[in-house]
Image (tube, helix red, strand yellow):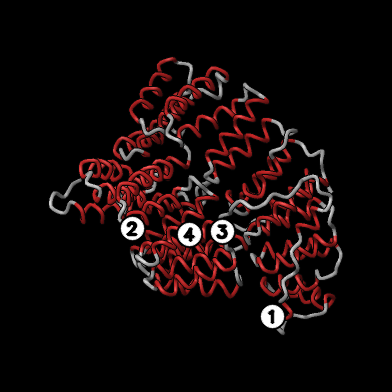
């Protein structure tokens, strides 16, 4: 079966949204004809039938039981039954069992079924790529890498579009860092085009490995020096690395080569560099030429004001766009966010309700649910979210996690933990739920239980940088085992060296260990990459502790302007400068 048709369709169906990360392991040789065999891990010693006596042990009986379970809406039983049915079965049954398990978000069952499918069809690129997808969800990066290599061998005539599409779907279904670790060495080969290398470089950026991303972009430009996609990415990498001169010169080259689609490149780079006033002037200059759609310029000016905390200006511009009749649902959503930030929750809720059935419906429902929880209307809030998941098992899983976050964000961490516990009965041993539970335990103040949960995850996925970083940060935040905490965090950074989360953790542990000067430098880099208010709060504290109070005040003031609702920044301000009331 072709990589370009069957495998892509299967990957699109294999949509389990989670947030693990990945590291770099030994590469599989894409020329190895035994790559498919190398990809296979032994099927788990405990099958669903062995773990639960209610699951039939006979594959034929399990297949019938699986169909009956589907008919009655019992997704967990169906996935487990079909996993048993896939044992020693045909490729068709392996495929069916894997898809049922993925649709039901039953990752252990999907892993068993995918392995059996791969055994039944070792040269089928569809089986190999879906197998790789499941492997990445479990952070089995070497197996995923070998399976991808096997898929490429099975369909060597796959087009650039096919390869790029497969790469994007693998990242979407797992995590950019995990996908990049698996794809890096098997995709970067001499025969790859500038298009494919640029896509891989883009994935490297998403995986927070800017050095490797830059290497890949340079390779792409050697193949096609006028590739505007590669040049755009090169400008973005320069921004992330803090090289404003290179970023702007590259942006101007994009504009020169692509006068149509590159029109706003310089303005976008200026905005990304934090040079808002220069970005505004560039947009006004473009308006003065008379050649540009003024509505698009107005939209960009409104977004620029919003992103830089000038809510009055943003509100004025978005309102003007609405009055012109040309604005989309996005403008309404921003107006609702502005109203919410200004304390007018009734107006914000009214706008969110108007957007419920629009292209912004999911975001509007979640935002409205938050406001309803603020008003003690939990049943109404959850009804908005549940309606999204009525006919979609993936949404059902996502919304369970979303509801837990909403409860925690509104002070009910016990309720959030109860929701996650209930979800784990429907989605057993789901990596996302296990990770969410560990983090939620920490938020609930159950530090011992949180650390124990993270230790369990680390034992299962010892190279996963997300788990390494989470355990390291939790230890550091509670001033426990600081040398080990730093070691764990540095191991995470080996896999994702420019991750703002891991850099924040490293800065925090260095501050906890008394090195405020080094901590400040690390945290500055973390904030420049991630623009996260919690990182800004840590940076301010490190600056203050290092004796740079004036710089700390400026950073705090600028961060509060961009993140006025940040509880972490407000807490830092009250702790460090309680008397003045302002940074």
Cα separation between marks 2 and 1: 45 Å
Local crowd size for mark 2, using a 10 Å CA cut-off: few (<14), some (14–19), many (≥20): some
Where is residue 356 shown, x and y percent of the image?
Answer: 48, 52
Between disc 3 and disc 1, whose residue precedes?
1
User: How many labels sit on residues?
Assistant: 4
Where is residue 199 shown, x and y percent of the image?
Answer: 63, 37
Disc number for residue 158 = none
Question: Which secondary structure lies at badge 3?
Answer: loop
Cα separation between marks 3 and 2: 24 Å
Where is residue 257 shown, x and y percent of the image?
Answer: 57, 18
Local crowd size for mark 4, using a 10 Å CA cut-off: few (<14), some (14–19), many (≥20): many
Give the residue displayed 73% in from the left and 61% down from the top.
99
Q: Residue furthest top?
A: 289
Q: Mark 1 highlights which residue?
A: 51
* Foreground pick, 84 / 398: 84
Cα separation between marks 3 and 1: 26 Å
- The answer to whether residue 247 of the structure is visible from this angle is yes
Question: Which secondary structure lies at badge 4?
Answer: helix
Between disc 3 and disc 4, whose residue precedes?
3
Q: Mark 2 highlights which residue?
A: 513
Camera-nearest label, 2 or 1: 2
- The answer to whether residue 339 of the structure is visible from this angle is no
Q: Mark 4 highlights which residue?
A: 488
Q: Mark 3 highlights which residue?
A: 464
Between disc 1 and disc 4, whose residue precedes?
1
Between disc 2 and disc 1, whose residue precedes?
1
Question: Which secondary structure lies at badge 1?
Answer: helix
């Amino acid at each position: 079966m072709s990589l370009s048709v069957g495998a892509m369709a299967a990957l699109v169906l294999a949509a389990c949204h989670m947030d693990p990360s990945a590291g770099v392991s030994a590469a599989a040789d894409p020329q190895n004809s035994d790559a498919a065999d190398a990809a296979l891990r032994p099927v788990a010693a405990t099958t669903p039938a062995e773990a639960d006596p209610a699951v039939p042990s006979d594959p034929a009986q399990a297949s019938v039981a699986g169909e009956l379970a589907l008919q009655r809406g019992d997704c967990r039983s169906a996935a487990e039954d079909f996993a048993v049915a896939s044992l020693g079965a045909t490729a068709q049954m392996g495929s069916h069992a894997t898809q049922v398990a993925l649709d039901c978000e039953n990752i252990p069952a999907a892993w068993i079924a995918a392995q059996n499918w791969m055994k039944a069809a070792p040269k089928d690129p569809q089986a190999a790529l879906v197998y790789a997808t499941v492997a990445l969800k479990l952070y089995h990066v070497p197996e995923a890498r070998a399976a991808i290599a096997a898929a490429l061998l099975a369909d060597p005539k796959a087009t650039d579009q096919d390869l790029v599409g497969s790469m994007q779907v693998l990242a979407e279904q797992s995590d950019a860092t995990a996908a990049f670790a698996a794809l890096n060495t098997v995709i970067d080969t001499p025969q790859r085009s500038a298009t494919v290398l640029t896509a891989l470089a883009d994935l490297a950026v998403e995986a927070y490995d800017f050095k490797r991303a830059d290497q890949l972009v340079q390779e792409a430009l050697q193949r096609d020096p006028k590739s505007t996609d590669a040049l755009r990415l090169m400008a973005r990498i320069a921004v992330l690395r803090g090289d404003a001169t290179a970023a702007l010169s590259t942006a101007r080259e994009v504009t020169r080569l692509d006068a149509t689609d590159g029109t706003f490149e310089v303005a976008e780079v200026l905005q990304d560099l934090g040079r808002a006033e220069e970005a505004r002037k560039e947009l006004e200059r473009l308006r003065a030429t008379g050649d540009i759609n003024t509505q698009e310029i107005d939209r960009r000016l409104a977004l620029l004001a919003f992103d830089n905390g000038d809510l009055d200006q943003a509100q004025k511009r978005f309102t003007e766009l609405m009055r012109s009749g040309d604005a989309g649902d996005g403008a309404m959503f921003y107006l609702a966010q502005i109203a919410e930030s200004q304390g007018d929750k009734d107006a914000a809720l009214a706008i969110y309700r108007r957007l419920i059935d629009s292209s912004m419906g999911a975001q509007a429902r979640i935002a409205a649910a938050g406001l309803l929880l603020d008003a003690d209307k939990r049943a109404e809030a959850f009804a908005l979210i549940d309606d999204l998941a009525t006919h979609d098992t993936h949404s059902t899983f996502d919304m369970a996690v979303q509801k837990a976050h909403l409860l925690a964000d509104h002070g009910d961490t016990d309720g959030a933990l109860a929701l996650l516990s209930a979800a784990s009965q429907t989605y057993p041993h789901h990596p996302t739920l296990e990770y969410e539970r560990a983090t939620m335990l920490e938020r609930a103040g159950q530090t011992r239980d949180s650390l124990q949960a993270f230790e369990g995850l680390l034992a299962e996925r010892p190279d996963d940088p997300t788990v390494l970083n989470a355990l390291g940060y939790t230890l550091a935040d509670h001033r426990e085992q600081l040398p080990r905490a730093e070691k764990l965090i540095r191991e995470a950074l080996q896999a994702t060296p420019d991750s703002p989360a891991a850099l924040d953790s490293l800065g925090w542990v260095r501050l906890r260990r008394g090195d405020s000067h080094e901590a400040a430098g690390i945290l500055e880099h973390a904030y420049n990459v991630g623009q996260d208010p919690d990182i800004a709060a840590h940076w301010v504290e490190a600056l203050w502790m290092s004796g740079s109070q004036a710089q700390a005040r400026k950073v705090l003031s600028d961060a509060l302007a961009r993140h006025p609702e940040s509880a972490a920044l407000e807490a830092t301000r009250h702790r460090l400068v309680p008397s003045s009331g302002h940074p």
